[in-house]
Amino acid sequence: MPKFPAHVWILLALIAGAAVGAAISVWWDTETWRAMGVENAKAFLSHTAPAADAPPLGDPSPLAHTVRFAGEAARFIGDLFLRLLRLIAVPVVLFSLAAAVAGVGNARTLGRVGGKTLLVFACTAVAAVFIAVALSLSVRPGRFVNETTRDAVLAERAKDAAGRVGDAEKFGASTSLWGQILDAFPANPFGALADGNMMQIVTMAILLGVGLTLVSEERRREAVRVLEALAEACLQVVLVVMKFAPVAVFCLTAIVVATMGWSVLGALAVFVVTVLAGLGIILFGVYPAMVTLFSKPRMSVGKFFRGMAPAQLLAFSSSSSAATMPVTMRCCRALGVSDRVTNLVCPLGTTVNMDGTALYQVMCVTFLAQVFGVPLGVGEYVTICAMAILVAIGSPGLPSASLVLMVFILEAVGIPTAGLALIIAVDRILDMARTVVNVTGDTAAAVVVASGEGELSPVGARPAPG
């Protein structure tokens, strides 16, 4: 096999998966299944009996069973890969962040580094929502969706939209500042670990690290060494898992592209392109400007993106910033960011630095307001932007989680929550794109903070191993 870097193999797998998925989407239809003896493909693929008013199952051929097995195997490989990364993400956050906080040694230094980190996060979040509002008002993508298209998509996706509204009610998240702060503290630390609640795990890790700074120096150093060893062990597991990344990325991408609703995507093309343009401005404008202006020694844009390639490609195919976080941390180190800053900024960023999600929330809500003819004034725009930032902070780093939390913003400004059906129809491709922005923002912030602390290596970027 050619000795390509890992990110090149992942890119090739992503392209191949997209090509295979597109081919299946275009050429695999009902007649293809009938040629293999399957009259009801939905029931056949789900291993269920056909409904009373649905076509009979038919007489599937051995080829049909082979095709079904191949599809199930591909989905299994992709899901197992993501599950392993999410499994590793929880202990990595707990151990690395606790070690980073305890390793600082005193509250004054911790406050300085943490303050710089949160300031960078806040500035990029404000820039994201500003870009979203500017694009929404200038393009007005909602005016390109006619009533016929709107009603057809709403009817087709009404069940999915109702399910997301129900999930939001179960989620019970508070969009107030006080509610967000309270939700960050777990009532049961083991419950937070079991649920994978990243916000609460981050809080636990910070409190544990602060507690270690208050014990004797000898015990603190011993504890930090243990935590760092455990974090490094987890990252070594990530290296092993990433050996299978190209295969998993191929499977994930092929499934997503094959099952994507291309007809709906065409009907909402202006909205999709507008969101992608906004994400592109952040990804190729805001972050490179940050890195170029505030890194010392100065880091070139090319080096930054080369160092970030493995995490960006994985983020695009997985749509999960939490699953990508261990790889993001390795990319930070490859860019010359110190372990201390990497261990502090990346776990925090995965939880609270969601610029792509904030932009997406604002653009979706304003798009639906335009579609339904709901007027928005200055007060409503301020409310949308503020709530989008708060919701993005509380959004789990999992695929499409922000759709559930979008319900709270829609209800706050009087937009029908049934409009989520329009967003669900095109969410998957936009989820992949905004996850790339989220993980890139974490690394850009780490570079800026490390530079301010004098902890950015002058060696420059190299492709992250694994």
Image (cartoon, grey):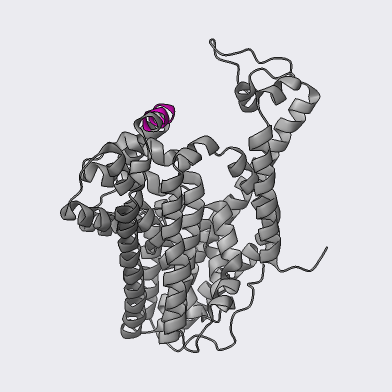
The reply to whether the magenta stretch includes residue 151 is yes
**Which residue is at the far right?**
1
Q: Quadrant of residue 9?
A: bottom right
Which residue occupies the foreground of this view, 147 or 352? 147
Q: Nearer the viewer, residue 337 or 156?
A: 156
Q: Is residue 10 above or below residue 105?
A: above
Quick one: 391 or 313, which is closer to the camera?
A: 313
Q: Is residue 302 magenta?
A: no
Question: For the stretch drawn in magenta, what is the main secondary structure?
Answer: helix
Percent position of residue 365, x then y: 31, 47
* Residue that appears at 51% across and 62% down: 91
Tell me which residue sits at (54%, 87%) in the image. 457
Residue drawn at the location 41% of the way across and 51% of the way down: 191
In this view of the protein, can residue 176 be seen by the observer? no
Q: Position of residue 367 (x, y in %)?
A: 33, 46
Which residue is depicted at the point 17% across and 51% down? 377
Q: Which residue sits furthest top?
A: 52
Q: Which residues are magenta?
A: 150-157
Note whether 251 is above or below 463 in the view shown. above
Spot occupied by residue 351 in the image (x, y as percentages of width and height):
40, 61
The spot of residue 173 in percent (x, y) is 29, 48
| Quadrant assignment, res 213 | bottom left
